[in-house]
Image (spheres, rainbow, N blue to C red):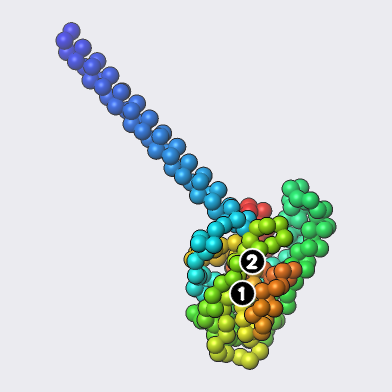
Amino acid sequence: MTKVMRRLGHVLAISAALGLAGLASAHAASEHKHSHSHADEAQKKVHDGYFEDDQVQARPLSDWEGDWQSVYPYLVDGTLDPVMADKAKHGDKSAADYRAYYEVGYKTDVDRILIAGPKVTFFRGETPVSGDYETDGHEILTYEKGNRGVRFIFKKVGGDEAAPSFIQFSDHIIAPQKAGHYHLYWGNDRVAVLKELTNWPTYYPANLDGKQILEEMLAH
């Protein structure tokens, strides 16, 4: 009988320990989920253009390194129509109105951009134009809605004369981080380029096809 009681006590002790371990594990998982939720919330706020000046940090050109393709052809051929329909469901315009808005925004004849080290190469068809760029700081812009955006600016220090004197990246990221896509503004007058708000050629990795870009856009 004593042996049975001891064995029962041992089983109860193990059960209690397992129960406590389970509770601790559940609590840790809950805390992890909670912290992730806060991080996602903070990231969404920044993405939507709500952040403090001191959150903005300098970014190197390597954040945008890679081979990139314009999404404009996918808008033109109808691949991105589901994105416009989705925006119409949640926004204040029709799908046709959103398409017209993005037609102006995405429009460009630079269908590919290659960034490696300080060199940025622009492709119009098969004709490349390259420049070497170095950082020229950043500017914070305030939009009509009250939200804000950051332009990370690079100036040309060498390369082809036809390459733009200034390029300005905007990608809803405000501190060093690899870009998944970006809007790019360019021209020879820094201030004039900063004032451009309606045309923002947009680039995604060149190794994605139209369907994958569509899925990326719908996920965000």
Where is 111 relative to 84, above or below? below
The quadrant in which residue 174 appears is: bottom right
The label on residue 141 is: 2
- Report x, y in % for residue 137: 54, 75
Q: Residue furthest top?
A: 1
**Residue at left offset 44%, top offset 42%:** 32
Q: Amino acid at mark 1?
A: Gln
Which residue has dot 1 on it? 168
The reply to whether dot 2 and dot 1 touch (C-beta < 8 Å) is no
Q: Amino acid at mark 2?
A: Leu
Around disc 1, counting alpha carbons within 10 Å, would you say few (fewer than 14), some (14 to 19), or many (20 or more)?
A: many
Q: How many marks?
A: 2
Disc 2 to disc 1, C-alpha distance: 12 Å
- Report x, y in % for residue 139: 59, 70
Where is 3 relative to 41, above or below? above
The residue nearer to you, when weighing 34 against 9, is 34
Q: Is residue 73 visible?
A: no
Q: Is residue 20 visible?
A: yes
The quadrant in which residue 140 appears is: bottom right
Which numbered disc, 2 or 1, marks the residue that appears first in the sequence? 2
- Report x, y in % for residue 67: 57, 74
**Residue at left offset 81%, top offset 63%:** 100
- SS at badge 1: strand
- Report x, y in % for residue 70: 67, 71
The residue nearer to you, when weighing 121 against 63, is 63
